[in-house]
Amino acid sequence: MAYPQWPVGRFFVDFANPVAKVAIECDGKAFHDVERDAKRQGEIEAMGWAVYRFTGRECNVESVIETSDDWGRISRRESPTLTRIREIGVRHGICWGACAV
């Protein structure tokens, strides 16, 4: 399970699984500062957390993308962002909500 705005030390991470100590941060252009974020991430990791960063755009994508082939058939596939989130879950042995069997 992922919880939004989870407290970690003196910070709040965008999404977290506190049992596995995994944080996902969404870096939007308006609030992203590379130096500040690197320092903050270092402090969070020093507390035993794994931190994964996504761009703000990646955090706002649909979970499924519709595509069509040359014949006009529509198919649905998972977005690269959702695929990456699932891979993070597998790496840490966690489920981000509804997991496919």
Image: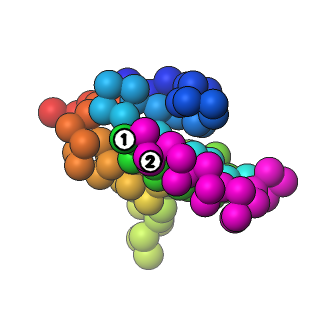
Magenta stretch bounds: 29-47
Q: Is residue 101 above or below residue 43?
A: above
Mark pair 2, 1: CA separation: 5 Å
Q: How many labels does the image show?
A: 2
What amino acid type is highlighted by mark number 1? Gly
Task: Tell me where residue 36 sits by quadrant.
Answer: bottom right
Q: Which residue is drawn at 37% across and 34% down?
A: 21
Q: Which residue is drawn at 61% across and 49% down?
A: 40
Which secondary structure type mostly characterizes the magenta part of the structure?
A: helix
Mark carried by residue 14? none
Q: Which of 79 and 43 is in front in this view?
A: 43
Residue at the outermost left position = 101
Query: Which quadrant would the C terminus be assigned to in this image?
Result: top left
Q: Percent position (x, y) of residue 100? A: 23, 34
Mark carried by residue 48? 1
Q: In this view, does 93 lie above or below 18?
A: below
Mark carried by residue 45? 2
**Left or right: where does residue 89 sit relative to residue 7?**
left
Q: Is residue 4 above or below residue 89?
A: above
Query: Which quadrant would the N terminus be assigned to in this image?
Result: top left
Residue at the outermost bottom position = 70
